[in-house]
Image (cartoon, helix red, strand yellow):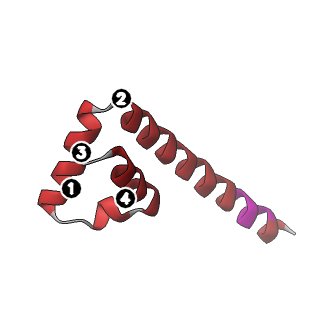
Amino acid sequence: MRCKDFVFLQSSGQINEMGQVKKTMALSHVWMCGACRTFRHNDELLSRYLMQFKANLLEDQGNQ
């Protein structure tokens, strides 16, 4: 798997929907590629921050 393919699958959320074989291929690439490992970490961190931000916005709207 190429880095370009992994970045597309990770950023679009398709890795979670992939079959076991393709998912294993993607994760194997991450184990070997430091750049994709960093990208995955940052992408997951950004997703968590956005979910927290959304929850805070909804909470603030509920209090008004």
Pick whichever, 62 or 25, lies toward us.
25
Task: Tell me the SS state at disc 2.
Answer: helix
Q: CA distance from mark 3 to mark 1?
A: 6 Å
Amino acid at pointer 4: Leu
Amino acid at pointer 1: Lys
49 relative to 18, above or below: above
In the image, is 46 to the left or to the right of 8? right
Instruction: Read off the residue under disc 4.
Output: 9
Q: Residue at x 24, y 34 (%)?
A: 31
Q: Position of residue 24 (x, y in %)?
A: 16, 50
Mark 4 or mark 3, earlier in chain: 4
Instruction: Read off the residue under disc 1.
Output: 23
Q: Position of residue 25 (x, y in %)?
A: 18, 50
Say which mark, if any, is on residue 27: 3
Majority secondary structure of the magenta segment? helix
Task: Tell me the SS state at disc 3.
Answer: helix
- Which is more foreground, mark 1 or mark 2? 2
Mark 2 or mark 3, earlier in chain: 3
Task: Tell me the SS state at disc 1.
Answer: helix
48 relative to 36, above or below: below
